[in-house]
Amino acid sequence: MDESATAQMRAAEPSASAAQVDIWSTGSVVAREKVSYWRETVCNAVFGISVETIPEQFSARITARNAGPLRFALSESTAYQIARTRQQIDAMPSDHYSIYLQLAGKTISSMNDGIYTFAANEIGLLDGRQPFRSLHGGRRAIAVLPRQMIERRAPWLTRRPHRKLAADSPFAELARQHLLALTNTESAVTETAMSVLCENLCNLVALASTEHTSADRLTPELQLEAILAFCRRNLHDAELSPQRVAAELGMSVRTLHWRFKQAGVTFGRWVRETRLEACATALRDPGHRAQNISDIAYRWGFNDLSHFNKAFRVRFNMTPREWRNEPRN
């Protein structure tokens, strides 16, 4: 066996600002030893799980990044079956939740007599204190987060420790983006930035898992996340108003305004600033070069060009046309 391939390969040394990255791969392992390497060196020794079935023609790779108690991984493999038993949990305790995004292929997982199938772009949530069995293959992005980070936002998860987030939830789509950012080991993300992304991810998972929980029963932090997520999806609507947002989320207009006040901004200012940022980005995007400035303004919810031009100049200290044509390196 190639020792350099079977060893834990460190792609980046840990530092105060950058997370540690480790890679495990069967790529350079001789064919007859791939299965035993993955079973013993990776699954059993590193992740505390057992391999129940594994094909002879097997390949796998895991790229993992750690930042204190936060762990992230990008996994790719041919299909094989794993399990985490009560004995393994007792021997290697891990008080966490795993949030995993299926990127390609399929995973079939069972826990407490429930069976869940995850296809591409679907997100699952798994309680690390519970035994499970899983048949998985393809590619997955995984975040392993301390239990208290999740449950202080979503205490209802204790009643259903394994679940599948609603695929059509707007919060699930934002959670996908966060998981991809956290598991992209090619990006230089500091531990501080990763912590912020994780806080946001926990909020999004909590919101996506609320199901029939109305917004007025959420924590203030989650209420604000729900408000901002709804507003971002509807920035194009010139009629977006506090009354409409409050009605959609089942809260009072007074509560909505109070959440913005706690964030240090008014509803109107947040909407205006966010629309202006979106317009500024579009104006400098080569893909939007053929679009008229007015079309971009209307697309992002401005229905008065005079007001848009004035607000843009105040915000960026130049007209939209000057902004678009300003030379950039």
Image (spheres, rainbow, N blue to C red):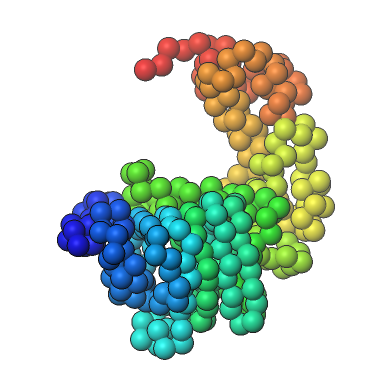
Residue at 72% x, 23% y: name it: 298
Depicted 234 relative to depicted 215: above or below: above
Depicted 225 relative to depicted 297: above or below: below
- Quadrant where the N terminus is found in the figure: bottom left
Residue 282 percent location from the top left of the image: 58, 24
Residue at 65% x, 48% y: name it: 229
> Left or right: 36 with respect to 270?
left
Camera-side residue: 93 or 216? 93
Residue 274 percent location from the top left of the image: 61, 35
Depicted 49 relative to depicted 8: above or below: below
Quarter assignment of residue 299: top right
Residue 110 percent location from the top left of the image: 59, 75
Camera-side residue: 36 or 221? 36
Residue at 70% x, 47% y: name it: 230
Residue 258 percent location from the top left of the image: 68, 54
Camera-side residue: 117 or 74? 117
